[in-house]
Amino acid sequence: MDAQTAPQKAVSGIAKTRVTAIPGDGIGPEVVGAVQRILAAAGAQIDWEEAEAGAAVFKRGIGSGAPQETLDSIARNRIVLKGPLETPVDYGEKSANVTLRKFFELYGNIRPVRELPGIRTPFSGRGIDMVIVRENVEDLYTGIEHMQTAGAAQCLKLITEPGSERILRLAAALTLAEGRKKLTCATKANIMKLTEGMMKRVFERIMPDYPAIEPAHMIIDNCAHQMVIAPEQFDVVVATNMNGDIISDLAAGLVGGLGVAPSSNIGDHAAMFEAVHGSAPQIAGRDLANPTALLLSAIMMLRHIGDFAAAEKVEQALLVTLEEGRNLTGDIARKGQGVGTTAYTDQVIANLGRTSAHASRAYKPLTLPDWPRGVWHQAPKAREVTGLDVFIETGTAPAELAAALQAAAEGTGLGLKMIENRGVQVWPALSGQPFLVDLFRCRFLLAEPAENADADIAKLMAAIGAKHTWMHVEKLQRFDGKDGYTKAQGEN
Ligand code: NAD
């Protein structure tokens, strides 16, 4: 933890850490209450400040699901323990979870995945013990989507260099803090060379700064495959948002599922700890919920705020409880032997001070770099415009469209190079037989690259707009001599 994420301490009495507690929806209040009870019994020095978010807030007409007082509480305390929040389907606009993650720029989603004693799975005995670090704010989750034609939708996959560097350095810092050895960066850089490739390139650039860590790169689909056939090979895995979302759920499934999966969301200004599971409305208010996932999240929180002793005490009590298999909740107990949330919580409290057969890992504080404030901007040494991609809606055949566009481009300084449909060049025609939809990307190149081609581009767009329906354009640029765009399948 760095100075920026340092929580606020209470001013009087023993130094307590003030933490915002959001009970949340469904089983949330039960599991949050259980965890608060265990932490108090373990002597964790926490001063809870309760705050509201979720369904009741949406119903009051607050579209973000989190009222200003809750946002203020988090901004003040910087540490949050959160119960699950229902994402309303028929009222409210956004997910309150996403609001909190985005509002506080909680860019790092950390999901430890390890085999727990007493939780039987097809992978028991394999020694699974890994952490998935998922980028939490960029990628397809920026939610920038547009209908291009009435039948073609597009989502923007936005990956930035500082966004990649931040998550990769967090993953490296975590590898060191947990005494781990290997960091695997899993990407789809073979297909998405600029976006997923950005993550891979930044990984290769920064890893020499961490000589104690063994770096590895793996293609994400192979990573999913390897996680099932040889999960014990993984130590820390880092991925972009969407890929990380999928592989972290896959990994959780190897060790018992979402019910025992904890997580933290880390940012420069706040950290939020929550179970991966949802509000389980079917069992809410019935003393049936398993608080283990949130308890594991709270243990992560204790380590984050530097209370390593309380974290270990609670972790050991939990492990003893699971090892002995007495008084477990119905979802993890032997058939017919399950007890309620309250009795399970009492059992963990009774086991405080005992030592499990499974030693806790030796954790060190997480040290994160201090990122500069303000707008990140990196001007290239040289920047040239080479042309323009214009996305056009038409039911016209490619050859006919090409003839019309060549005529439109006359005298504009740009010439039609190729037309593609869903990534495959269709003019000049290749030998394949692509299925065509009404969305064509038409690539125009300047005779010579130019520092500024706006006048030529405006002339071309006026000519195209007079006869065609276009949706958007992308400037083709070269940064420091390198093309800042990819080629279509089949394009020379
Ligand atoms: P869920 O995780 O709530 O439930 C899936 C299944 O797991 C259900 O059978 C449920 O009973 C069981 N389960 C979950 N947690 C449990 C626990 N602690 N103990 C025992 N059993 C447990 O997923 P869902 O039904 O898809 O979602 C319900 C609501 O939760 C939705 O509104 C969804 O948007 C929300 N949700 C919130 C979060 C979050 O706040 N981070 C995450 C996921 C889903």
Image: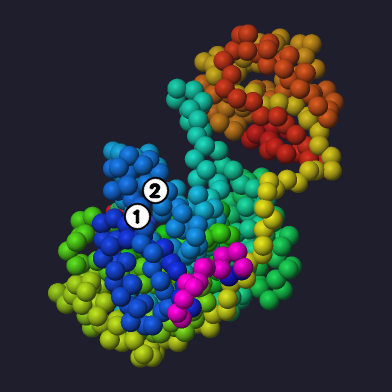
Q: Relative to residue 370, is residue 244 drawn left or right? A: left
Residue 253: x and y, percent? 38, 64
Left or right: 117, with 191 as reference point: left
Asked whether 437 or 483 is in front, the reply is 483
Q: Nearer the viewer, residue 410 or 48?
A: 48
Is residue 392 left or right of 129 when viewed as pictured? right
Amino acid type, label 2? Pro
Q: Which residue is mark 1?
A: 52
Q: Residues within 10 Å of mark 1 (few under 14, many from 20)?
A: many
- How many C-alpha atoms fall within 10 Å of the one at disc 2: few (<14), some, or many (≥20)? some
Q: Position of residue 422 (x, y in %)?
A: 56, 31
Classify mark 2: helix, strand or loop: loop
Dividing the image into 4 quarters, which one contains the C terminus? top right
What is the chief secondary structure element of the magenta stretch?
loop
Disc 1/disc 2 C-alpha distance (Å): 7 Å
Q: Are marks 1 and 2 in contact (CB under 8 Å)?
A: yes
Residue at image location 68% in from the left, 38% down from the top: 486
Write down the region rendered in magenta. Answer: 3-14
Left or right: 30, with 422 as reference point: left
350 to 385, vertically: above or below: below
- Residue 400 vs 141, above or below: the answer is above
